[in-house]
Amino acid sequence: MVNTRQADAAPNARHSRARIRCLLLAALMCGMTMVGAQLSIPLPYVKLTLQTFFVMLSGMILGPVYGPLSQAAYVLLGLAGLPVFSEGGGLAYIFKPTFGYLLGYPVASAAIGRYLHGAHRECGVKDVATSRLIIAGVLGLMAIFIPGVFMLYMNLNFLAATPISWQAAVWSGFLIFIPGDVLKLTGAIAVYRMLQRLT
């Protein structure tokens, strides 16, 4: 009986350690997203930041559970009043033209994590083809830009009284960021490969 209990306890202990490790990594990724928000280049309507770099990394490394958890924590901390967004924080941020992008962060991380890790809940890197990493990154970026551009258009036209066409919203809220996001996706894949070699 003692041996049976010990045998049952060992997998539970490993699972608990793995869960704690994933939670710590999620907290770290949340913090890195905060840092990424402060590294920005002003552009019309939407700033260029490093946030999406860390959003993509969170899904790639942390998977479909802990990745979106890290990004949901980031958004909730900002809405709670911590100045972690690119223009501060607080509940009033939901009325900002760029709030749609923030809503897409947990969804993007979940989409990337699900595509790469499947239903596997644990975090970590594994050997996957570069093409899958690229597709995952593109899926994640679309999960950010679709609500981002939609809410940018709606906010500017109906809340901010700053009329903008769909074409202008797509250009200033999506197309202008493609070169930078290609570089960020390339960087995220490079970091993923580096971590893969180290583990």
Image (tube, grey):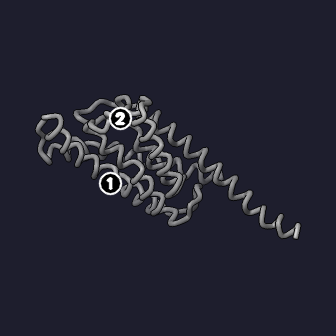
Is 113 on the left-hand or right-hand side of 143? right
Alpha-carbon neighbours of circle 1 within 10 Å: few (<14), some, or many (≥20)?
some
Tell me the residue at 84%/70% (across/down).
4
Mark 1, residue position: 142
Name the quadrant containing residue 48: top left
Instruction: State whether residue 124 is above or below residue 88.
Output: below
Residue 164 position, x and y percent, is: 13, 40
Is 102 on the left-hand or right-hand side of 164? right
Residue 150 visible: yes
Tell me the residue at 55%/46% (across/down).
26
Is 108 on the left-hand or right-hand side of 148? right
Tell me the residue at 34%/42% (across/down).
180
Q: CA distance from mark 2 to mark 1?
A: 25 Å
Instruction: State whether residue 57 is above or below residue 130.
Output: above
Mark 2, residue position: 91
Amino acid at pointer 1: Met
Q: Please name which of the two marks, 2 or 1, marks the residue nearer to the observer.
A: 2
Residue 49 position, x and y percent, is: 37, 36
Quadrant of the drawing holding the N terminus:
bottom right
Q: Nearer the viewer, residue 163 or 142?
A: 163
Alpha-carbon neighbours of circle 2 within 10 Å: few (<14), some, or many (≥20)?
few
Residue 175 visible: no
Residue 52 position, x and y percent, is: 40, 44
Dot placed on the residue nearer the N-terminal end, 2 or 1: 2
